[in-house]
Amino acid sequence: MNRATDQPEPNPLREGLATRAVPQPCSIVIFGATGDLTHRKLVPALYNVAADGELPPAVTIVGFARRKKRDEEFRRDLEEATRKFSRQPVRDEIWKTFGQSIFYHQSEFGDESGYEQLVKRLDEIDKTHGTRGNRLFYFAAGPDQFEPILKHLKAAGLNETRKGSWVRVIVEKPFGTDLASARELNRIIHNSFTEEQTYRIDHFLGKETAQNILVLRFANAIFAPLWNTHYIDHVQITAAETLGVGTRAGYYEGAGALRDMVQNHLLQLLCLTAMEPPTDLSADSIRDEKVKAVRSLRHWSRNDIAASVVRGQYAKGAIHGDPVLGYRQEENVNADSQTETFVALRLFIDNWRWADVPIYMRVGKRLPKSATEISIHFKKAPAVLFNKDLHDLNVLVIRIQPDEGISLRIHAKVPGTSFHIEPVKMDFHYGTSFGKASPEAYERLLLDAMSGDATLFARRDEVEQAWAFIDPIEEAWHAKKDVPELFFYPAGSWGPEAADDLLARDGRAWRKL
Amino acid sequence: MPAVSEKTYSIGVPVEVAKIDHELKKLWRESEGAATRASLMNLAVYSEAPGSLNSNTQLMARITEDHACRAIVIEADCKAEEDGVDAWISAHCHVSRAGSKQVCSEQISFRLNGGCTSQLPNIVLSNLDSDLPLYLWWQNEFHEPMDPQLWAWVDRVIYDSQPWQDFRAQMRLVESAQAEAKQRIILCDLNWTRLDKVRFALAQFFDHPASHHRFAKIKKVRIDHASGFRSTALLFVGWLAAQLNWRAEKTEGRNKLQFVSSSGQRIDIEIRQCDGQPIHELVLTAGDIEFAVTHAKCGDLLEVSRGIAGEKRVPQLMPAGKNDPVSLMSEELMRGGPHHVYLHAVERVRDLL
């Protein structure tokens, strides 16, 4: 999206060949390299960018994990996983060279000598593979491991930037579980790395449609004058999925939908929708505006929370006609769990642009269909001429996934001699208009981190402001008295009725997806 | 109406020229629900080669898989004694990536007889999908008169300079038409597109600032090209010269060129014909380091390596791109923006082409 501020002198031979910052040679050290994320997402993503010719030849992957393994075994495991999860088929000849740049480093995360060995190994790789002392540390391990890893990286001097090279760290969510823990995590990270070196990854921001929100808003003059309280009635943001908690119960029980989805993904989408135009496309200009949007969210009193936030949990029901268990019956879930699998919120942004425009968000598991979208509901035209009996509003829908695209609902006269007006939809589908498949979010984000472009990564203040908004809700839900009710909804429905009431009170309804 | 099948390779059903719009509407009405029409551009294809209507229809069937458009395919027989226009309509339909629906591009085909140039502007202009850019793929050599009425509407003109006999004369025609049209027509040369992957492969060697000092040490470039692709190799030389600020010094025969860099370094360029791909191999020597880009045996990959001459190296693989018209067009249609770099490259070698 932008050219990073610390970009080196441009390569004259690149002119006209690339419209993005160029990724630099480096060693990518993945902590937690034997885990799911590495096998399902990270290495397949790196393979795909290599197969597309976007990965510099001098990029190596060093897996850091506890299990005993040799390079060859690690490569075989990753090849098998990549063949299974890659967006494009694996070609033997490409894997052969790609695989040769993968290494395994066995060590406990808390073992100092493991890091000392890592230093030697990376120096050796610099010499043999031309990675030029550049290091990208990817934290794919659990957050409880961050502190020992960071401490030992610092002790081994691996956080230090040598002349002409760089060191960056990518941190996976969750970025804490509340404001205090997020601050503590940031403190721990900043003991070893500066904010400029820290890339907090939210894969939602790597999606093509999420990136397109800014293009839609700021490259099309028709929307700019309408994008405010004078013309927008309300906004809805939905992230629905048919899946249940699956194998994530261990994590999800302690997190719930609010922390798992709203604090990061949904608030990021809200920021892109609500932010003011940035002064330029640099990472910090964009993130400055996003932070202002989160900071302007209206904070609630206890009473407001009960009235503006609905939490729910799925009970047994059916998905696509198949019976499914309720949340409390799922494996590794407490039989009396109070964890929310659904949240609906009615919130406001108290600034000039969005004054009095309600923003409704809902996120849930075991809903009838999987869909993530933002819908902008415009105000009615004056109730004279045609609009006396019209109830539908003009709606602009930005579909994030699946079936990425944009649609606009307008009113049209039904052909005939009578004067009958119906809503019609103008629809743009990425998949229809552009034949080429979009890269996976991780492909884009890994290349950005290698290029030093932090635009699509969350900054410290964004994360902390988001927690400052979320914390009072969590506190209300975990209070000793006057706790807002946990509503149950059958799996396969659109959540509890209380979520519908949230809008019905304002004379509105959720968009039918 | 033509069957809306996964791929339509025929030029479709004959229609009266005056009723094309009406017949297209009928076509979509009848297939409503089963297929979605999509279009991002008007892509007009002009050829004077006999039988091109059919061969271009096959190309469009494949190009529209990735580039939804309204295709206007024109075959002209300018020497026909009688003037006349025949027209057909058809649809190229493909299952979308989501896999649930058919996405279709429409094609209007014309055979022009007799006064081709006078008929052409009206045929194109009266059949454009409104508000979409017009890309004109000109498959012949250009010739006078270049109708300003048509050129004023063209956003991108796509041609392949590779078979041109007289590059300078052809470019003069294109550039004068461009000037006369008084609008920003972007010149897209498929012979330049052919170089994309090779340029990319060479450029990536110099991404790190620490390697930039090697630009000043370049002393030798060797380019091996397939028969008929000398112009492609020369465009490559033009690119290096323009981007690295080299000045042409002298030529020894057709295949040995000499340039001088801004710091006075002499650069010897050797262009050799060989069997293989259009640009089969290039080796750039800077000081004691060789940067090599070679087509791998499997054809669609490039082996890229750097190292001291004569020493064993482990090459990396990168996509090579393909030399067929569908791949070249797809590559060209994927990218937007002007082609300043191409124009600068042409400037440096215009007299050699």
Image (spheres, helix red, strand yellow):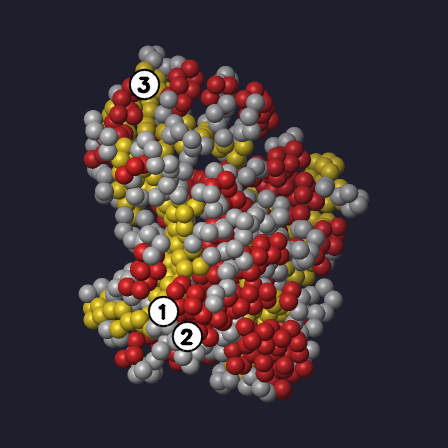
Q: Nearer the viewer, mark 3 or mark 1?
A: 1
Circle 2 SS class: helix
Q: CA distance from mark 3 to mark 2?
A: 76 Å
Quarter of the figure with the C terminus of chain A: bottom left
Q: Residue at x 52, y 35 (%)?
A: B188
Q: Which residue is under mark 2?
A: A477
Say which mark, if any, is on residue A311. 1
Q: Which residue is under mark 3?
A: B85
Q: Position of residue A435 (x, y in %)?
A: 39, 47
- Amino acid identity at mark 2: Trp
CB atoms of marks 1 and 2 within 8 Å: yes
Res A14 seen here: yes
Res B296 seen here: no
CB atoms of marks 3 and 2 within 8 Å: no
A281 over A338 or under it: above or below: above
Left or right: where A131 falls relative to B321: right
Circle 3 SS class: strand
A119 over B122 or under it: above or below: below
Q: Position of residue B29 (x, y in %)?
A: 23, 34
Query: In terms of depth relative to the viewer, which is nearer, B125 or B224?
Result: B125
Circle 1 SS class: strand
* Residue B42, quarter of picture: top left
